[in-house]
Image: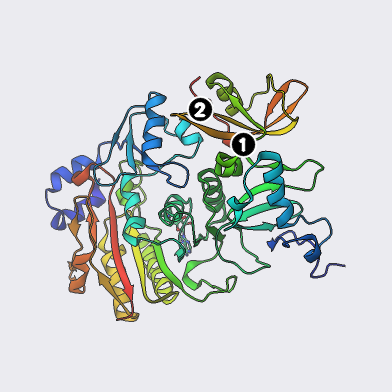
Amino acid sequence: MSGDNDNVGRRFDRLPATAAERTVDGRATREEVVDYFETRFAIPAETFDEYTFWEKGSGKIWVYAGEAPSPLEIEAIGMTCLRTRQEHWKPTTDAVQRFGTHADRCVIELDREEAARFVAGEDQELEWDGDWGYLIAAHEVAGAVEPLGVGLYVHGEFRSMVPKGRQRDLER
Amino acid sequence: MEPLERYRPIIDDFEAFLEACQRPLGNAVRVNTIKASADRAVATLEEEGVGFERADWNPNVIRLETDSPGSTWSSFHGFTHGQEEVSVVPPVVLDPQPGERVWDACAAPGGKATQLAALMDDRGTVVANDSNLGRLSALRFNAERLGATALAVTNQDARNYSLKPFDFDAFDRSLVDAPCSCEGTIRKNPDTLDGWTEEHMHSVAGVQKGILRRAIQATREGGTIVYSTCTFAPEENEAVVNHVLETEDCRVREFDLALEHSPGVTEWDGEAYDESLERAARIYPHQNDTGGFFVAKLEVGA
Ligand SMILES: C[S@@+](CC[C@H](N)C(=O)[O-])C[C@H]1O[C@@H](n2cnc3c(N)ncnc32)[C@H](O)[C@@H]1O
């Protein structure tokens, strides 16, 4: 049966504020999403005060600044920011570039050479004594630290998660 | 070049115009202020050793001295976006404000839609529409790379656009950056005139009228519309605006433009257009060493 409360693949549904308002099993709540960014990356919850979060398909979360009713059947709103249906949630490269400047935890700072490898999609051995899992890769650009994207850190290796279409060969 | 001969009567210094049309165009980028200030973008380019020159008419336009503007750190971070210099003009003329509802009727691949979002500090709603789904995927890619969160993307024929997906029934401002015969892009695509026919031009003009008409209907009383094309043909420019002046409740507004340009024409091929079309701007390649563009600003209602 496919009723109103199912997760419909072609349509955007606004995330419920909290678990108490949840009508679709397994759907993340706004509270959990904001919490995730705050707990994992120390991105202050207020960063998202003016945004709404939406799900389209299973577990793909979008962040949006504009107005729209829910549910909504259009091509896209705002940008994809997070995948939630696996055990470990995974932020997107573009969301990390957009909001990662506010991050203060699980941010691995790369030098220019390492950053270029990361952007080219390469995996590399790196020292890191923080948490394992998804990290924000960042480097210094013109005097300030700038997020590059997401990588997965396990067993001393940092794997670039930059999607193929975003990878570039840049000056090292 | 031959199809351009017909514009000899309306273009001052026609030889300089023809000569400019044969010169290749450099690579310009627009600073994406959603992600970086112009100062930060410029500092990033300097740090990575990319040569550039800043445009004097707009602080966010930079002319790059590289053949691969997409392969810079600045571009990877979304600080800059490859966008032809004149193509930056229409959103500037539309002048959208943070929090407004703005429609980009023909938005793909999204250079102007993301610029609209940036001009609004990425606050408000920019409905980016295009009838071509393939081109919309390029728009979505660009929007995400540039971090534009105020965009809502729709796939409709703009001529009979429905606002049904949304809770509001009119936009504050609309941009119609219409499909056109693209004569003004000849410096980028030298073969753009190869398939030129008068028939095609008239059929495109029909689509343009349909889209502009719908944009006027979908914009609130007192709201602003910008109509733009990258072509020289008055049939696709002044004639299209003249058509909606006759059929819809709207008028042509004056605007400031710091780039050298010529006024819109009020007579062409035996037809006369409304005098107010002089307020439109024709930007020719030889005037600022750019591509060509036409821009008209309209206001809905009296
Ligand atoms: C000049 S391009 C737009 C460029 C875009 N504004 C930008 O800055 O990146 C014109 C666009 O109009 C679209 N188009 C053509 N006919 C249309 C229609 N009837 N409704 C909506 N879009 C249409 C084309 O697919 C094309 O992407």
Q: Is residue B253 above or below residue B146?
A: below
Which residue occupies 26% across, 56% down? B232
Give the residue drawn at x 61%, y 35%.
A149
Q: Is residue B200 left or right of residue A91?
A: left
2 vs 1, front mark: 1
Place of residue A145 in the rendered image (x, y in percent of width and height, measured from the top left): 52, 31
In the rendering, at what x and y percent does residue B129 appear? Answer: 51, 61
Q: Name the outermost residue toward the left.
A: B13
Report whether mark 2 lies on the same chain as mark 1: yes
Label 1: chain?
Answer: A
- Residue B89 % position (x, y): 31, 53
The residue beneath circle 2 is A140
In the image, the residue with mark 1 has its CB under 8 Å from the nearest atom of ligand 1: no
Question: At x 19% / y 40%, what residue is drawn?
Answer: B19
Of the numbered discs 2 and 1, the one sitting upstream in the chain is 1
Q: Is residue B44 above or below residue B228?
A: above
Which label number is shown at residue A104? Answer: 1
Closer-to-camera residue (B192/B293): B293
Most distant residue in the right direction: A1
Q: Residue B67 shows which numbered tag?
A: none
Q: Which amino acid lies under the numbered mark 1 shown in the image of this protein? A: Asp
Say what secondary structure mark 2 lies in.
strand
Q: What residue type is disc 2 on?
A: Glu
